[in-house]
Image (spheres, helix red, strand yellow):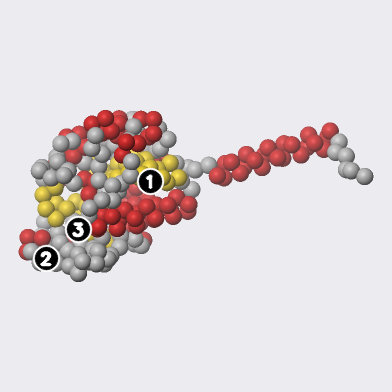
Amino acid sequence: MPKIYTRIQIFTVLPLIFLFSSLIAQTNKKSFHVIAFYTARNDQAHISFVHEANKWFEEMAKKYNFSYDSTKDWTNMNAKFLAKYQAVIFLDTRVEAPAQRKAFEEFMKNGGGWLGFHFAAFALTPSDFNADWDWYHNEFLGSGQYVSNTWRPVSAFLRVEDHNHPATKGLPDIIKASPSEWYRWEKDIRKNPDIKILLSVDSTSFPLGTGPKLHEIWHSGYYPIVWTNKNYKMVYFNFGHNDIDYEHHTNEDLSHTFPNPEQEKLILNSLIWVATGEKVN
């Protein structure tokens, strides 16, 4: 004989079903949404980093319950597409088309978050990446044009300049960064009141680089590596260039950016802040 459910039993069960459905939906809801743009073209060192970073961010997204998407299609840099995200990442290059640049600038000025790595700040006239975006290079990043770099990619000891910023929360005074090529810039961002330097090269890193050209080795000086602009929710990292076996024409990786627990903590802290936090003065 089939079981007959009374009206009272049905009315008791239905709210429980709705409750469990709601709890599942809340569990699956992502805390924030991130989109990474990249080019991954020409320089194997940058391509290697992009592949590593995409894999690492995907793992972090699962672990910390945020969504992570990535794209090579820079035409997605428009208001409609960006409206789905709280944070944008430039993994290796920058946006070029005027309309797309305007969309990114408006996204940032309206409270969006941004992380940029290494080549994302590169600009040099003349080159394939001319210094033709004044707002981005001179106001937003504050660094101006690229001037020179160290060689080969080597690890560096980085000194935390500000322990009070959300990006550096829980970091020791000195962290050891993974090997990278390190950039020097046209402008001294210490003189820019809008820029807050978070980490710089510690003197124990010198000499930094191995050459073979002597001018590619830093022996002294002040070099900012990670910084933010107080007017935006953004963090730039001057690393993201793996060492590659160019000499033997194998293009094999000789170093990796991940894993590196302290560096990863810095990146993750920064991402959570730019995606969910308020601007820090």
Which image quarter: residue 74?
top left
Which is more toward the observer, 9 or 169?
A: 9
Say the numbered circle drawn on residue 228. Answer: none
Please give left or right for residue 162 compared with residue 86 in the image.
left
Compared to residue 32, the image places residue 63 above or below, namely below
- Label 1, secondary structure: give it: strand
Please give left or right for residue 40 compared with residue 184 in the image.
right
Kind of residue indicated by mark 1: Ser
On-image quarter of the C terminus: top left
* Outermost residue toward the bottom in this view: 248
- Label 3, secondary structure: give it: loop
Going 19% across and 69% down the picture, which residue do you hit? 248
Please give left or right for residue 208 compared with residue 21 in the image.
left
The answer to whether mark 1 and mark 2 are in CB contact below 8 A is no
- Label 2, secondary structure: give it: loop
Residue 137: x percent and y percent? 18, 39
Q: What is the C-alpha distance between the residues marked 2 and 3? A: 11 Å
Which is more toward the observer, 140 or 55?
A: 55
Disc 2 target residue = 211
Residue 143: x percent and y percent? 16, 43
Please give left or right for residue 71 compared with residue 198 in the image.
right
Which is more toward the observer, 167 or 99?
A: 99
Disc 1 target residue = 70
Say the numbered circle drawn on residue 181. Answer: 3
Foreground label between 3 and 1? 1
Sequence-first disc among 1 and 2: 1
Kind of residue indicated by mark 2: Gly
Going 84% across and 33% down the picture, which residue do you hit? 7
Q: What is the C-alpha distance between the residues marked 3 and 1? A: 24 Å
Which is more toward the observer, 98 or 258?
A: 98
